[in-house]
Image (cartoon, rainbow, N blue to C red):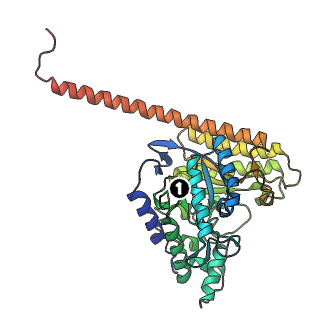
């Protein structure tokens, strides 16, 4: 089986981010995120639409408003798309051919996020057809004479691999006219996500996804479904076979952290709210435990939410779901565990009615949920402060011991006192 060349792609990313690393970049240390030497916890959100809206200068105020509102409630990480392949207002309208106006929109997003102290996770391609995704890459290859029978050929075909590798290189090497930095040098960008929710239904074993690369990856955008490497865990999955393997796909050495998504209202749509919450608890407990004991890497809950379009929806049920997630994250974080944060789906601001999907949180309109978000931000900030104080005490002790050692060495053989 041919392998998708993530090693080359990740080599570009690793070389770019580590060789020139400096203060302000988020890194991993063991099973934690760290920023400037202190543990870092992400309380954040998804906003896939940021580049799309910013590509129209008259709409950029919506991006600014959303980021400003998020920052004012303590949110520190946004996950968004760095892709739009073909279709309306694309970033890449053909392999290697880019729409400069849309790229300037992404430039604006990166600059504006930095202005508001928000780190970005940039996803590089979609599993789904929206915004092009792997289907568009496969269609581009077909139009250039490749005989491809499935969208899952995205993971196998050499021409598609080249298209994708070139896109990654283009994004990483993009010069941002707003910041004066190349993307690869900008500490506002926290992480690269290689694909949003990769799925390979033509191979339920998960081995095709694993063939992406066995050595080098950063963050793969996985939803957290268990596969053949842990058969005892597969009973936790909702009734779907999607061709991924949470353990095997995240054990690749170059992956810096694992991700998990959770939508009980979609995955268990025929179950009542209490059964959905029970599923959420078990899902999070299992992934936190496995990230801690098997993967030994940070775990980010990169998508979760509850739709107001669900039958019988009420805000209390959504708040219960948010509370459950936030309590799990906090309980792990305060004991130094692997749960490194969560990102709800999705943040909107006023004036974006056409983007409502049922899961949207508009800070000014969702008072009880917004309060939960703010409280969680504060609690994670307090944990970070405690760890910072502990680090400062250790530094002080080491400095005092060093000064005492120097004083003793200077005064060896001297008579002290009368």
Q: Position of residue 44 (x, y in %)?
A: 63, 48
Nearest to the observer: residue 163 or residue 402: 163
**Residue 65 percent across, percent down from the top left:** 69, 49
Q: Is residue 143 above or below residue 209?
A: below
Specify few, some or many for label 1: CA neighbours under 10 Å numbering under 14, 14-19, or 20 or more.
many
Q: Residue at x 62, y 70 (%)?
A: 91
Instruction: Report the number of discs.
Output: 1
Identity of the residue furthest to the front in this view? 58
Which of 59 and 48 lies nearest the eye of the viewer? 59
> Tag 1, which secondary structure?
strand
Q: Quadrant of residue 149?
A: bottom right
Q: Can you tell which quarter of the image residue 15 is in?
A: bottom left
Residue 225 place in picture, x, y as percent: 65, 62
Residue found 75% across the figure and 42% down from its top:
369
Residue 241, can we see it?
A: yes
Image position of 329 with respect to 104: above or below: above
Most extreme residue toward the right, as rendered? 312
> Residue shown at 12%/16% (left/top)?
415
Vertical arrangement, residue 386 with respect to residue 305, above or below: above
| Residue 202 visible to the viewer | no
The quarter of the rendered structure image containing the C terminus is top left
184 to the left or right of 369: left
Nearer the observer, 197 or 9 = 9
Q: Nearer the viewer, residue 111 or 46?
A: 111
Give the residue number, with chain letter if any, for mark 1.
Answer: 189
Left or right of 66, for residue 251 = left
């Amino acid at each position: 089986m041919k392998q998708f060349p993530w090693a080359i792609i990740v080599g570009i990313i690793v070389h770019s981010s580590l060789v020139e690393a400096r203060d302000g970049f988020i890194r991993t240390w063991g099973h934690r995120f760290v920023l400037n030497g202190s543990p870092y916890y992400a309380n954040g959100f998804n906003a896939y639409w940021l580049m799309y809206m910013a590509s129209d200068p008259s709409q950029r105020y919506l991006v600014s408003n959303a980021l400003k509102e998020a920052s004012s409630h303590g949110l520190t990480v946004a996950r968004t798309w760095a892709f739009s392949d073909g279709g309306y207002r694309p970033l890449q309208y053909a392999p290697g051919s880019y729409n400069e106006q849309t790229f300037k929109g992404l430039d604006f997003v990166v600059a504006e996020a930095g202005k508001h102290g928000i780190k970005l996770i940039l996803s590089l391609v979609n599993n789904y057809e929206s915004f092009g995704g792997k289907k568009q890459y496969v269609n581009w290859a077909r139009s250039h004479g490749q005989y491809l029978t499935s969208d899952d050929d995205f993971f196998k075909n050499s021409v598609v691999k080249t298209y994708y590798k070139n896109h990654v290189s283009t994004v990483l090497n993009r010069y941002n006219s707003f910041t004066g930095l190349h993307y690869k040098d900008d500490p506002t960008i926290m992480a690269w996500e290689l694909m949003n929710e990769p799925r390979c239904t033509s191979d339920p074993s998960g081995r095709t996804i694993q063939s992406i690369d066995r050595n080098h990856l950063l963050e793969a955008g996985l939803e957290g479904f268990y596969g053949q490497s842990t058969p005892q865990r597969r009973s936790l999955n909702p009734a779907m076979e999607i061709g991924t393997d949470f353990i095997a796909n995240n054990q690749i050495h170059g992956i810096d952290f694992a991700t998990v998504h959770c939508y009980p209202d979609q995955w268990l749509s025929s179950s009542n709210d209490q059964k959905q919450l029970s599923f959420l608890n078990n899902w999070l407990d299992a992934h936190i435990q496995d990230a801690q004991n098997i993967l030994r890497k940070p775990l980010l809950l990169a998508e979760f939410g509850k739709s107001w379009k669900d039958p019988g929806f009420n805000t209390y049920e959504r708040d219960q779901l948010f509370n459950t997630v936030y309590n799990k994250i906090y309980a792990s974080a305060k004991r130094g565990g692997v749960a490194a944060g969560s990102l709800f789906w999705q943040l909107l601001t006023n004036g974006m009615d056409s983007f409502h999907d049922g899961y949207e949180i508009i800070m000014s309109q969702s008072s009880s949920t917004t309060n939960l978000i703010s409280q969680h931000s504060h609690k994670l900030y307090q944990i970070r402060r405690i760890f910072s104080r502990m680090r400062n005490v250790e530094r002080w002790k080491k400095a005092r011991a060093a000064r005492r050692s120097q004083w003793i060495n200077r005064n060896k053989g001297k008579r002290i006192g009368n």
